[in-house]
Amino acid sequence: MRVKAALLLALLLGATVAEAQLPGLRRRGPTPQQPVLSTIDAQRAEFAAQSGGTTVYFGTNSAILGAPAKATLGAQAAWLRRHPAVVVRIEGYGDGLDTRDHALAVGARRAEEVRSYLVLLGVPGAQVSTTSWGKERTGLGRTVTILVR
Amino acid sequence: MKKIFGSLLLLGIGSAAAAQQPTAMVIAIPPLTSPDSGNKGNEMLAIGWNVTQAIEADLRQTAEVMPLKPNRDDYYPYPEVTGPNFTKWRQARAKTLVTGFVQGRSDGRVTVGCYVYDVEKGRELARKGFIIGANDWRRAAHKCSGLAYTAITGAPGIFDTRIAYVAETGVGEARTRRIAVMDSDGQGHRYLTSGDAMALTPRLAAKGDSLAYVSFAGGRPAVRVIDLGSGQERALVPGDAISFAPHFSPDGSRIAFSMMLGANSDIYVASASGGALRRLTTSPGIDTDPSFSPDGSKIVFESDRGGSQQLYVMNADGTGQRRITFGGGWYAAPSWSPDGQSIAFTRIGQDGRRIGVVGADGGGEKVLTSGPGDEGPTWAASSREILFQRSLGTGRTTLYRVSLDGSDPRELATPQGGSDPDWSGVAE
Protein backbone atom coordinates (compact mmCIF):
# COMPACT_ATOMS: atom_id res chain seq x y z
CA MET A 1 0.00 0.00 0.00
CA ARG A 2 1.62 3.18 -1.09
CA VAL A 3 1.30 6.21 1.06
CA LYS A 4 -0.67 8.93 -0.60
CA ALA A 5 1.61 11.64 -1.77
CA ALA A 6 1.17 15.13 -0.59
CA LEU A 7 1.69 18.42 -2.29
CA LEU A 8 2.28 21.48 -0.27
CA LEU A 9 1.66 25.06 -1.08
CA ALA A 10 4.02 27.15 0.95
CA LEU A 11 3.72 30.87 0.99
CA LEU A 12 6.66 32.99 0.12
CA LEU A 13 7.31 36.63 0.62
CA GLY A 14 10.36 38.02 -1.11
CA ALA A 15 13.66 36.31 -0.61
CA THR A 16 13.45 35.87 3.14
CA VAL A 17 11.52 32.65 2.92
CA ALA A 18 14.18 30.19 1.90
CA GLU A 19 14.14 28.50 5.27
CA ALA A 20 10.39 28.39 5.57
CA GLN A 21 9.46 26.32 2.54
CA LEU A 22 9.55 22.93 4.13
CA PRO A 23 6.79 20.46 3.40
CA GLY A 24 3.76 20.06 5.60
CA LEU A 25 2.30 17.08 7.36
CA ARG A 26 -0.12 15.05 5.36
CA ARG A 27 -2.95 15.39 7.79
CA ARG A 28 -4.02 17.84 10.37
CA GLY A 29 -2.54 17.20 13.79
CA PRO A 30 -3.59 18.56 17.16
CA THR A 31 -3.99 22.31 17.19
CA PRO A 32 -0.61 23.82 17.96
CA GLN A 33 0.02 26.67 20.27
CA GLN A 34 0.06 29.81 18.21
CA PRO A 35 3.02 32.10 18.67
CA VAL A 36 2.69 35.77 17.90
CA LEU A 37 2.40 35.80 14.12
CA SER A 38 4.62 37.83 11.89
CA THR A 39 3.22 39.08 8.62
CA ILE A 40 4.18 36.02 6.67
CA ASP A 41 3.03 33.68 9.39
CA ALA A 42 -0.29 35.51 9.48
CA GLN A 43 -0.65 35.24 5.74
CA ARG A 44 0.17 31.57 5.84
CA ALA A 45 -2.37 31.00 8.53
CA GLU A 46 -4.99 32.97 6.62
CA PHE A 47 -4.19 31.20 3.38
CA ALA A 48 -4.46 27.81 5.02
CA ALA A 49 -7.67 28.71 6.83
CA GLN A 50 -9.45 30.25 3.86
CA SER A 51 -8.43 27.71 1.23
CA GLY A 52 -9.23 24.57 3.15
CA GLY A 53 -5.62 23.48 3.59
CA THR A 54 -2.25 23.73 1.96
CA THR A 55 -1.98 20.13 0.86
CA VAL A 56 -3.63 18.29 -1.98
CA TYR A 57 -3.49 14.54 -2.47
CA PHE A 58 -2.93 12.24 -5.41
CA GLY A 59 -3.30 8.55 -6.10
CA THR A 60 -0.25 6.32 -6.43
CA ASN A 61 1.93 7.33 -9.37
CA SER A 62 -0.81 9.72 -10.51
CA ALA A 63 -0.83 13.45 -11.20
CA ILE A 64 -4.59 13.61 -11.81
CA LEU A 65 -6.46 16.16 -9.72
CA GLY A 66 -9.48 14.67 -7.97
CA ALA A 67 -12.58 16.59 -6.83
CA PRO A 68 -11.26 17.31 -3.30
CA ALA A 69 -8.00 18.60 -4.75
CA LYS A 70 -9.85 20.86 -7.19
CA ALA A 71 -12.03 22.23 -4.39
CA THR A 72 -8.95 23.11 -2.34
CA LEU A 73 -7.21 24.65 -5.33
CA GLY A 74 -10.33 26.62 -6.23
CA ALA A 75 -10.31 28.25 -2.80
CA GLN A 76 -6.56 28.83 -3.03
CA ALA A 77 -6.95 30.47 -6.43
CA ALA A 78 -9.61 32.81 -5.11
CA TRP A 79 -7.38 33.81 -2.20
CA LEU A 80 -4.36 34.29 -4.46
CA ARG A 81 -6.34 36.51 -6.81
CA ARG A 82 -7.23 38.68 -3.82
CA HIS A 83 -3.57 38.80 -2.77
CA PRO A 84 -1.65 39.41 -6.00
CA ALA A 85 1.50 40.43 -4.14
CA VAL A 86 1.84 37.06 -2.49
CA VAL A 87 4.07 34.54 -4.23
CA VAL A 88 3.61 30.82 -3.66
CA ARG A 89 5.81 27.92 -4.42
CA ILE A 90 4.23 24.58 -5.25
CA GLU A 91 6.33 21.72 -3.96
CA GLY A 92 5.57 18.32 -5.48
CA TYR A 93 6.37 15.02 -3.79
CA GLY A 94 6.75 11.59 -5.33
CA ASP A 95 5.86 8.24 -3.83
CA GLY A 96 8.18 6.96 -1.11
CA LEU A 97 8.38 3.49 -2.57
CA ASP A 98 9.29 4.71 -6.04
CA THR A 99 12.84 4.93 -7.40
CA ARG A 100 14.60 8.25 -6.92
CA ASP A 101 14.52 9.79 -10.37
CA HIS A 102 11.02 8.63 -11.28
CA ALA A 103 9.80 10.09 -7.99
CA LEU A 104 11.43 13.43 -8.87
CA ALA A 105 9.59 13.43 -12.18
CA VAL A 106 6.28 12.45 -10.57
CA GLY A 107 6.66 15.20 -7.98
CA ALA A 108 7.45 17.76 -10.67
CA ARG A 109 4.49 16.60 -12.73
CA ARG A 110 2.11 16.91 -9.77
CA ALA A 111 3.41 20.39 -8.99
CA GLU A 112 2.98 21.38 -12.62
CA GLU A 113 -0.57 20.04 -12.74
CA VAL A 114 -1.46 22.13 -9.69
CA ARG A 115 0.19 25.19 -11.17
CA SER A 116 -1.64 24.75 -14.46
CA TYR A 117 -4.94 24.43 -12.63
CA LEU A 118 -4.34 27.57 -10.57
CA VAL A 119 -3.39 29.48 -13.71
CA LEU A 120 -6.50 28.13 -15.40
CA LEU A 121 -8.49 29.62 -12.53
CA GLY A 122 -7.01 33.04 -13.18
CA VAL A 123 -3.94 33.16 -10.96
CA PRO A 124 -1.14 35.00 -12.79
CA GLY A 125 1.66 32.57 -13.71
CA ALA A 126 4.28 34.81 -12.14
CA GLN A 127 2.61 34.30 -8.77
CA VAL A 128 3.20 30.53 -8.69
CA SER A 129 6.44 28.61 -9.14
CA THR A 130 7.06 24.87 -8.85
CA THR A 131 9.67 22.47 -7.60
CA SER A 132 9.90 18.78 -6.83
CA TRP A 133 11.31 17.03 -3.78
CA GLY A 134 10.77 13.61 -5.29
CA LYS A 135 10.87 11.13 -2.44
CA GLU A 136 13.62 13.00 -0.64
CA ARG A 137 11.63 14.81 2.02
CA THR A 138 8.40 12.92 2.46
CA GLY A 139 7.33 12.69 6.05
CA LEU A 140 9.26 15.78 7.08
CA GLY A 141 8.30 19.32 7.78
CA ARG A 142 6.51 19.07 11.09
CA THR A 143 7.78 22.39 12.15
CA VAL A 144 6.53 24.27 9.17
CA THR A 145 3.15 22.66 9.37
CA ILE A 146 2.70 24.20 12.78
CA LEU A 147 3.82 27.51 11.37
CA VAL A 148 1.18 27.66 8.65
CA ARG A 149 -1.75 26.25 10.53
CA MET B 1 61.73 -24.72 11.39
CA LYS B 2 59.98 -21.39 11.44
CA LYS B 3 59.31 -21.63 7.73
CA ILE B 4 57.68 -25.01 8.05
CA PHE B 5 55.44 -23.72 10.79
CA GLY B 6 54.40 -20.86 8.50
CA SER B 7 53.47 -23.25 5.75
CA LEU B 8 51.44 -25.43 8.05
CA LEU B 9 49.61 -22.42 9.34
CA LEU B 10 48.84 -21.36 5.80
CA LEU B 11 47.67 -24.83 4.96
CA GLY B 12 45.16 -24.65 7.78
CA ILE B 13 43.85 -21.26 6.76
CA GLY B 14 43.67 -22.30 3.14
CA SER B 15 41.55 -25.34 3.91
CA ALA B 16 39.12 -23.42 6.06
CA ALA B 17 38.76 -20.75 3.43
CA ALA B 18 38.19 -23.28 0.69
CA ALA B 19 35.50 -24.94 2.77
CA GLN B 20 33.66 -21.66 3.28
CA GLN B 21 33.75 -20.53 -0.32
CA PRO B 22 34.26 -23.51 -2.56
CA THR B 23 33.83 -21.48 -5.72
CA ALA B 24 36.51 -18.90 -4.95
CA MET B 25 40.00 -19.31 -6.41
CA VAL B 26 42.57 -19.54 -3.61
CA ILE B 27 45.51 -17.25 -4.23
CA ALA B 28 48.78 -17.02 -2.27
CA ILE B 29 50.47 -13.65 -1.84
CA PRO B 30 53.79 -14.08 0.01
CA PRO B 31 55.50 -10.76 0.84
CA LEU B 32 57.10 -8.97 -2.08
CA THR B 33 60.88 -9.21 -2.03
CA SER B 34 63.63 -6.83 -3.14
CA PRO B 35 66.92 -7.13 -5.00
CA ASP B 36 68.30 -4.23 -2.95
CA SER B 37 70.44 -4.80 0.15
CA GLY B 38 71.30 -2.99 3.35
CA ASN B 39 69.19 -0.07 4.52
CA LYS B 40 67.84 0.44 1.04
CA GLY B 41 66.75 -3.18 0.97
CA ASN B 42 64.94 -2.87 4.28
CA GLU B 43 63.19 0.24 3.05
CA MET B 44 62.08 -1.56 -0.11
CA LEU B 45 60.93 -4.62 1.86
CA ALA B 46 58.80 -2.35 4.04
CA ILE B 47 57.12 -0.92 0.95
CA GLY B 48 56.77 -4.44 -0.40
CA TRP B 49 54.97 -5.54 2.75
CA ASN B 50 52.54 -2.64 2.40
CA VAL B 51 51.91 -3.55 -1.21
CA THR B 52 51.41 -7.21 -0.28
CA GLN B 53 48.81 -6.40 2.35
CA ALA B 54 47.00 -4.01 0.04
CA ILE B 55 46.84 -6.70 -2.67
CA GLU B 56 45.33 -9.10 -0.17
CA ALA B 57 42.75 -6.51 0.92
CA ASP B 58 41.85 -5.82 -2.73
CA LEU B 59 41.38 -9.45 -3.65
CA ARG B 60 39.51 -10.23 -0.46
CA GLN B 61 36.76 -7.82 -1.62
CA THR B 62 35.97 -10.00 -4.58
CA ALA B 63 33.67 -12.98 -4.77
CA GLU B 64 35.89 -14.91 -7.18
CA VAL B 65 39.27 -14.82 -5.46
CA MET B 66 40.12 -15.97 -1.94
CA PRO B 67 43.54 -14.76 -0.78
CA LEU B 68 45.54 -16.67 1.82
CA LYS B 69 46.67 -14.33 4.57
CA PRO B 70 50.16 -13.05 3.74
CA ASN B 71 52.78 -14.29 6.18
CA ARG B 72 56.14 -12.58 6.67
CA ASP B 73 57.71 -15.97 7.25
CA ASP B 74 57.09 -16.80 3.60
CA TYR B 75 59.74 -14.32 2.51
CA TYR B 76 61.66 -15.54 -0.52
CA PRO B 77 64.93 -14.36 -2.14
CA TYR B 78 64.82 -12.21 -5.27
CA PRO B 79 65.56 -15.02 -7.81
CA GLU B 80 62.44 -16.82 -6.68
CA VAL B 81 60.28 -14.03 -8.08
CA THR B 82 60.65 -15.72 -11.45
CA GLY B 83 61.28 -19.21 -10.11
CA PRO B 84 58.78 -19.76 -7.36
CA ASN B 85 58.47 -22.82 -5.14
CA PHE B 86 55.32 -24.27 -6.70
CA THR B 87 55.43 -27.42 -4.53
CA LYS B 88 55.10 -25.36 -1.38
CA TRP B 89 52.06 -23.47 -2.69
CA ARG B 90 50.43 -26.60 -4.05
CA GLN B 91 50.64 -27.99 -0.52
CA ALA B 92 48.99 -24.80 0.71
CA ARG B 93 46.14 -25.52 -1.72
CA ALA B 94 46.75 -22.29 -3.60
CA LYS B 95 45.70 -22.36 -7.22
CA THR B 96 47.31 -19.05 -8.05
CA LEU B 97 50.42 -17.31 -6.76
CA VAL B 98 51.51 -13.70 -6.84
CA THR B 99 55.20 -12.87 -6.51
CA GLY B 100 56.99 -9.60 -6.99
CA PHE B 101 59.64 -7.18 -5.90
CA VAL B 102 60.26 -3.56 -5.04
CA GLN B 103 63.47 -1.99 -6.29
CA GLY B 104 64.79 1.49 -5.61
CA ARG B 105 65.69 3.72 -8.54
CA SER B 106 68.33 6.40 -8.78
CA ASP B 107 65.63 9.07 -9.26
CA GLY B 108 64.10 8.27 -5.85
CA ARG B 109 61.13 6.44 -7.26
CA VAL B 110 60.70 2.67 -7.09
CA THR B 111 59.97 -0.13 -9.53
CA VAL B 112 57.31 -2.62 -8.47
CA GLY B 113 57.35 -5.91 -10.37
CA CYS B 114 54.36 -8.15 -10.21
CA TYR B 115 54.04 -11.78 -11.42
CA VAL B 116 51.04 -14.10 -11.47
CA TYR B 117 51.42 -17.87 -11.70
CA ASP B 118 49.17 -20.88 -12.17
CA VAL B 119 50.41 -23.02 -9.29
CA GLU B 120 49.07 -26.36 -10.55
CA LYS B 121 50.54 -26.01 -14.01
CA GLY B 122 53.67 -24.19 -12.82
CA ARG B 123 53.08 -21.60 -15.50
CA GLU B 124 53.32 -17.82 -15.64
CA LEU B 125 49.96 -16.17 -16.32
CA ALA B 126 50.91 -12.51 -16.35
CA ARG B 127 53.58 -10.02 -15.33
CA LYS B 128 53.82 -6.28 -15.23
CA GLY B 129 56.13 -3.63 -13.82
CA PHE B 130 55.19 -0.19 -12.52
CA ILE B 131 57.33 2.81 -11.67
CA ILE B 132 55.84 4.84 -8.89
CA GLY B 133 56.67 7.38 -6.21
CA ALA B 134 57.70 5.63 -3.00
CA ASN B 135 54.57 6.92 -1.25
CA ASP B 136 52.28 5.87 -4.08
CA TRP B 137 52.59 2.14 -3.35
CA ARG B 138 48.83 1.75 -3.04
CA ARG B 139 48.33 2.44 -6.75
CA ALA B 140 50.94 -0.21 -7.57
CA ALA B 141 49.13 -2.66 -5.32
CA HIS B 142 45.81 -1.95 -7.09
CA LYS B 143 47.48 -2.48 -10.46
CA CYS B 144 48.99 -5.75 -9.27
CA SER B 145 45.64 -6.88 -7.83
CA GLY B 146 44.01 -6.07 -11.16
CA LEU B 147 46.66 -8.08 -13.01
CA ALA B 148 45.95 -11.13 -10.83
CA TYR B 149 42.18 -10.71 -10.98
CA THR B 150 42.19 -10.42 -14.76
CA ALA B 151 44.51 -13.41 -15.10
CA ILE B 152 42.08 -15.50 -13.05
CA THR B 153 38.71 -14.27 -14.27
CA GLY B 154 39.41 -12.76 -17.67
CA ALA B 155 37.57 -9.61 -16.54
CA PRO B 156 39.03 -6.15 -15.89
CA GLY B 157 40.14 -5.56 -12.31
CA ILE B 158 38.12 -3.23 -10.17
CA PHE B 159 40.83 -2.02 -7.83
CA ASP B 160 42.17 1.18 -9.33
CA THR B 161 38.64 2.59 -9.50
CA ARG B 162 36.68 5.24 -7.69
CA ILE B 163 33.24 5.27 -6.13
CA ALA B 164 31.13 8.41 -5.94
CA TYR B 165 28.11 8.38 -3.65
CA VAL B 166 25.90 10.54 -1.47
CA ALA B 167 27.14 10.62 2.12
CA GLU B 168 24.17 10.93 4.46
CA THR B 169 24.30 12.07 8.05
CA GLY B 170 21.48 12.78 10.47
CA VAL B 171 17.87 11.85 10.09
CA GLY B 172 14.69 13.68 9.20
CA GLU B 173 15.00 17.39 8.84
CA ALA B 174 18.57 17.42 10.10
CA ARG B 175 19.75 15.07 7.39
CA THR B 176 22.54 16.41 5.21
CA ARG B 177 23.54 14.87 1.93
CA ARG B 178 26.89 15.56 0.38
CA ILE B 179 28.57 14.19 -2.70
CA ALA B 180 31.65 12.14 -1.73
CA VAL B 181 34.30 10.29 -3.74
CA MET B 182 36.67 7.58 -2.57
CA ASP B 183 38.90 4.88 -4.03
CA SER B 184 37.11 1.56 -4.26
CA ASP B 185 39.10 0.33 -1.22
CA GLY B 186 37.81 3.23 0.86
CA GLN B 187 41.05 5.25 0.73
CA GLY B 188 41.24 8.87 -0.34
CA HIS B 189 37.74 9.72 0.84
CA ARG B 190 36.75 13.33 0.19
CA TYR B 191 33.64 15.49 -0.05
CA LEU B 192 32.82 17.48 -3.17
CA THR B 193 29.84 19.47 -1.89
CA SER B 194 29.39 21.33 1.37
CA GLY B 195 26.08 19.91 2.52
CA ASP B 196 24.33 23.32 2.53
CA ALA B 197 22.04 22.13 -0.25
CA MET B 198 20.74 18.62 -0.84
CA ALA B 199 22.72 16.72 -3.48
CA LEU B 200 21.73 13.55 -5.32
CA THR B 201 22.88 11.05 -7.95
CA PRO B 202 26.60 11.71 -8.54
CA ARG B 203 27.84 10.25 -11.83
CA LEU B 204 31.55 10.07 -12.70
CA ALA B 205 32.96 10.56 -16.16
CA ALA B 206 34.86 7.47 -17.30
CA LYS B 207 38.22 9.20 -17.08
CA GLY B 208 37.39 10.29 -13.56
CA ASP B 209 38.10 13.94 -14.36
CA SER B 210 34.60 15.27 -13.81
CA LEU B 211 31.39 14.46 -12.02
CA ALA B 212 27.76 15.36 -12.72
CA TYR B 213 25.12 15.45 -9.97
CA VAL B 214 21.78 16.94 -9.04
CA SER B 215 21.78 19.95 -6.73
CA PHE B 216 18.86 21.58 -4.94
CA ALA B 217 20.90 24.72 -4.31
CA GLY B 218 18.67 26.83 -6.53
CA GLY B 219 15.46 25.54 -4.95
CA ARG B 220 14.72 23.24 -7.88
CA PRO B 221 16.67 20.10 -8.75
CA ALA B 222 19.20 20.83 -11.48
CA VAL B 223 22.15 18.97 -12.99
CA ARG B 224 25.53 20.46 -12.17
CA VAL B 225 28.99 19.42 -13.36
CA ILE B 226 32.16 19.56 -11.23
CA ASP B 227 35.63 19.57 -12.77
CA LEU B 228 37.46 17.36 -10.27
CA GLY B 229 40.86 18.80 -11.18
CA SER B 230 40.07 22.46 -10.65
CA GLY B 231 37.04 22.10 -8.39
CA GLN B 232 35.10 24.43 -10.70
CA GLU B 233 31.38 23.81 -10.79
CA ARG B 234 28.61 24.95 -13.12
CA ALA B 235 25.06 24.22 -14.22
CA LEU B 236 24.84 21.79 -17.13
CA VAL B 237 22.19 23.78 -18.99
CA PRO B 238 21.17 27.42 -18.58
CA GLY B 239 17.76 28.43 -17.28
CA ASP B 240 15.80 27.18 -14.32
CA ALA B 241 14.19 24.03 -15.74
CA ILE B 242 14.05 21.01 -13.45
CA SER B 243 16.76 18.59 -14.64
CA PHE B 244 18.03 15.35 -13.11
CA ALA B 245 19.32 11.80 -13.74
CA PRO B 246 22.62 12.75 -15.48
CA HIS B 247 24.78 10.08 -17.09
CA PHE B 248 28.04 10.56 -19.03
CA SER B 249 28.65 9.00 -22.42
CA PRO B 250 31.54 6.50 -22.30
CA ASP B 251 33.97 8.97 -23.89
CA GLY B 252 32.92 11.67 -21.45
CA SER B 253 31.98 14.13 -24.20
CA ARG B 254 28.20 14.10 -23.64
CA ILE B 255 25.76 13.90 -20.76
CA ALA B 256 22.30 12.35 -21.14
CA PHE B 257 19.75 13.48 -18.54
CA SER B 258 16.07 14.15 -17.86
CA MET B 259 14.50 17.57 -18.07
CA MET B 260 10.97 18.71 -17.31
CA LEU B 261 9.11 20.73 -19.89
CA GLY B 262 5.84 21.54 -18.19
CA ALA B 263 4.52 18.28 -16.73
CA ASN B 264 6.54 16.19 -19.14
CA SER B 265 9.89 14.53 -18.39
CA ASP B 266 11.95 13.67 -21.46
CA ILE B 267 15.51 12.60 -22.11
CA TYR B 268 17.97 15.10 -23.52
CA VAL B 269 21.63 14.96 -24.36
CA ALA B 270 24.07 17.87 -24.14
CA SER B 271 27.79 18.16 -24.57
CA ALA B 272 29.50 17.82 -21.20
CA SER B 273 30.44 21.47 -21.49
CA GLY B 274 26.75 22.34 -21.74
CA GLY B 275 26.24 23.10 -25.44
CA ALA B 276 24.46 21.26 -28.26
CA LEU B 277 21.30 20.46 -26.30
CA ARG B 278 19.22 17.85 -28.08
CA ARG B 279 15.94 16.21 -27.14
CA LEU B 280 15.88 12.42 -27.59
CA THR B 281 12.41 11.40 -26.41
CA THR B 282 9.03 13.05 -26.91
CA SER B 283 6.57 10.69 -25.23
CA PRO B 284 3.98 12.25 -22.91
CA GLY B 285 5.04 9.78 -20.20
CA ILE B 286 7.95 10.08 -17.79
CA ASP B 287 11.19 9.16 -19.55
CA THR B 288 14.22 9.14 -17.26
CA ASP B 289 17.41 7.42 -16.06
CA PRO B 290 19.31 7.18 -19.37
CA SER B 291 22.46 5.00 -19.43
CA PHE B 292 24.80 4.65 -22.41
CA SER B 293 25.99 1.36 -23.85
CA PRO B 294 29.80 1.06 -23.51
CA ASP B 295 30.33 1.83 -27.21
CA GLY B 296 28.18 4.95 -26.89
CA SER B 297 25.86 3.92 -29.71
CA LYS B 298 22.76 3.16 -27.63
CA ILE B 299 20.97 4.39 -24.54
CA VAL B 300 18.83 2.32 -22.19
CA PHE B 301 16.23 4.30 -20.23
CA GLU B 302 13.08 4.02 -18.20
CA SER B 303 9.65 5.09 -19.44
CA ASP B 304 6.07 4.75 -18.23
CA ARG B 305 4.67 5.59 -21.68
CA GLY B 306 2.96 2.20 -21.81
CA GLY B 307 1.25 2.64 -18.45
CA SER B 308 3.93 1.20 -16.17
CA GLN B 309 7.66 1.81 -15.75
CA GLN B 310 9.58 -0.35 -18.21
CA LEU B 311 13.03 -0.34 -19.78
CA TYR B 312 13.52 0.81 -23.35
CA VAL B 313 16.57 0.92 -25.61
CA MET B 314 17.15 3.54 -28.29
CA ASN B 315 19.96 4.63 -30.54
CA ALA B 316 22.02 7.47 -29.08
CA ASP B 317 20.32 9.89 -31.48
CA GLY B 318 16.87 8.96 -30.16
CA THR B 319 15.80 6.72 -33.05
CA GLY B 320 14.67 3.11 -32.81
CA GLN B 321 13.04 3.20 -29.36
CA ARG B 322 11.86 -0.23 -28.24
CA ARG B 323 10.80 -1.84 -25.00
CA ILE B 324 13.00 -4.66 -23.66
CA THR B 325 11.34 -5.71 -20.37
CA PHE B 326 8.23 -7.85 -20.35
CA GLY B 327 8.64 -9.82 -17.10
CA GLY B 328 5.71 -8.28 -15.22
CA GLY B 329 6.24 -5.72 -12.48
CA TRP B 330 7.91 -2.37 -12.92
CA TYR B 331 11.49 -1.75 -14.00
CA ALA B 332 13.50 1.36 -13.24
CA ALA B 333 16.95 2.94 -13.04
CA PRO B 334 18.75 0.87 -15.70
CA SER B 335 22.55 0.72 -15.94
CA TRP B 336 24.39 -0.77 -18.91
CA SER B 337 27.30 -3.10 -18.01
CA PRO B 338 30.84 -2.11 -19.06
CA ASP B 339 31.14 -5.29 -21.17
CA GLY B 340 27.92 -4.40 -22.98
CA GLN B 341 26.26 -7.73 -22.25
CA SER B 342 23.80 -6.88 -19.49
CA ILE B 343 21.60 -4.19 -18.06
CA ALA B 344 21.10 -3.89 -14.30
CA PHE B 345 17.82 -2.45 -13.01
CA THR B 346 15.67 -1.82 -9.96
CA ARG B 347 12.53 -3.90 -10.06
CA ILE B 348 9.51 -2.58 -8.21
CA GLY B 349 6.92 -5.11 -7.11
CA GLN B 350 4.63 -6.03 -4.25
CA ASP B 351 7.68 -7.20 -2.33
CA GLY B 352 9.47 -3.87 -2.63
CA ARG B 353 12.45 -2.81 -4.68
CA ARG B 354 15.05 -5.35 -5.75
CA ILE B 355 18.14 -5.34 -7.97
CA GLY B 356 18.28 -7.53 -11.05
CA VAL B 357 19.95 -7.93 -14.43
CA VAL B 358 18.68 -8.64 -17.91
CA GLY B 359 20.55 -9.28 -21.15
CA ALA B 360 21.02 -6.21 -23.32
CA ASP B 361 18.55 -7.83 -25.75
CA GLY B 362 15.96 -8.24 -22.98
CA GLY B 363 16.50 -11.97 -22.39
CA GLY B 364 17.63 -13.94 -19.34
CA GLU B 365 16.23 -11.74 -16.58
CA LYS B 366 17.55 -12.53 -13.11
CA VAL B 367 16.78 -10.90 -9.76
CA LEU B 368 19.87 -10.69 -7.52
CA THR B 369 18.73 -9.22 -4.21
CA SER B 370 15.90 -9.80 -1.80
CA GLY B 371 15.00 -6.16 -1.16
CA PRO B 372 12.77 -4.67 0.03
CA GLY B 373 14.58 -1.33 -0.11
CA ASP B 374 17.24 -1.84 -2.79
CA GLU B 375 17.78 0.54 -5.69
CA GLY B 376 20.22 2.40 -7.89
CA PRO B 377 22.50 -0.31 -9.37
CA THR B 378 25.92 0.63 -10.78
CA TRP B 379 28.42 -1.78 -12.31
CA ALA B 380 31.94 -2.70 -11.30
CA ALA B 381 34.45 -2.36 -14.14
CA SER B 382 34.63 -6.16 -14.17
CA SER B 383 30.92 -6.41 -15.16
CA ARG B 384 30.74 -9.14 -12.50
CA GLU B 385 29.54 -7.11 -9.55
CA ILE B 386 26.90 -4.48 -8.91
CA LEU B 387 26.95 -1.78 -6.27
CA PHE B 388 23.60 -0.44 -5.03
CA GLN B 389 21.93 1.30 -2.12
CA ARG B 390 19.94 -0.55 0.48
CA SER B 391 17.51 1.25 2.79
CA LEU B 392 17.38 -0.46 6.13
CA GLY B 393 14.30 -0.40 8.33
CA THR B 394 16.04 2.02 10.65
CA GLY B 395 15.87 4.85 8.13
CA ARG B 396 19.57 4.40 7.45
CA THR B 397 20.73 3.77 3.89
CA THR B 398 24.02 2.06 3.09
CA LEU B 399 25.91 0.78 0.07
CA TYR B 400 25.93 -2.91 -0.78
CA ARG B 401 27.68 -4.92 -3.47
CA VAL B 402 26.40 -8.11 -5.01
CA SER B 403 28.11 -10.52 -7.36
CA LEU B 404 26.33 -11.87 -10.43
CA ASP B 405 26.99 -15.41 -9.18
CA GLY B 406 24.11 -15.04 -6.73
CA SER B 407 26.10 -14.90 -3.49
CA ASP B 408 24.78 -12.75 -0.67
CA PRO B 409 25.19 -8.99 -0.96
CA ARG B 410 27.89 -7.50 1.26
CA GLU B 411 28.00 -4.05 2.78
CA LEU B 412 30.57 -1.61 1.45
CA ALA B 413 31.82 0.44 4.37
CA THR B 414 31.52 4.21 4.16
CA PRO B 415 32.19 6.76 6.91
CA GLN B 416 28.48 7.62 7.11
CA GLY B 417 25.32 6.32 5.55
CA GLY B 418 25.50 6.19 1.78
CA SER B 419 23.18 6.25 -1.21
CA ASP B 420 23.23 6.72 -5.00
CA PRO B 421 26.57 5.01 -5.69
CA ASP B 422 28.42 5.30 -8.99
CA TRP B 423 31.43 3.08 -9.68
CA SER B 424 34.05 4.30 -12.17
CA GLY B 425 36.08 2.35 -14.70
CA VAL B 426 39.77 1.54 -14.14
CA ALA B 427 42.02 4.61 -14.02
CA GLU B 428 44.79 4.87 -16.62
Image (cartoon, helix red, strand yellow):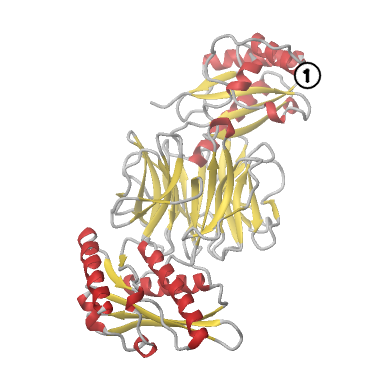
Q: State the image coordinates of residue B8 (x, y, percent, origin top left).
A: 22, 72
Q: Is residue A48 visible to the viewer in this orientation of the structure? A: yes
Specify the quadrant that holds the N terminus of chain A: top left
Q: Residue at x 68, y 16 (%)?
A: A77
Residue type highlighted by circle 1: Pro
Q: Is residue B156 visible to the viewer in this orientation of the structure? A: no
B172, above or below B214, in the image: above
Q: Nearer the viewer, residue B247 or B183?
A: B183
A76, above or below B292, in the image: above
Read off the chain for label 1: A
Q: State the image coordinates of residue B106 (x, y, percent, origin top left).
A: 59, 89
Q: Residue at x 38, y 60 (%)?
A: B61
The quadrant holding residue B135 is bottom right
Q: Nearer the viewer, residue B37 or A10?
A: B37
Say which residue label 1 marks: A84
Q: Secondary structure at mark 1?
A: loop
B37, above or below B270, in the image: below
Q: State the image coordinates of residue B133 (x, y, percent, origin top left).
A: 57, 77
How many numbered discs sit on the rendered protein?
1
Q: Nearer the viewer, residue B216 or B21?
A: B21
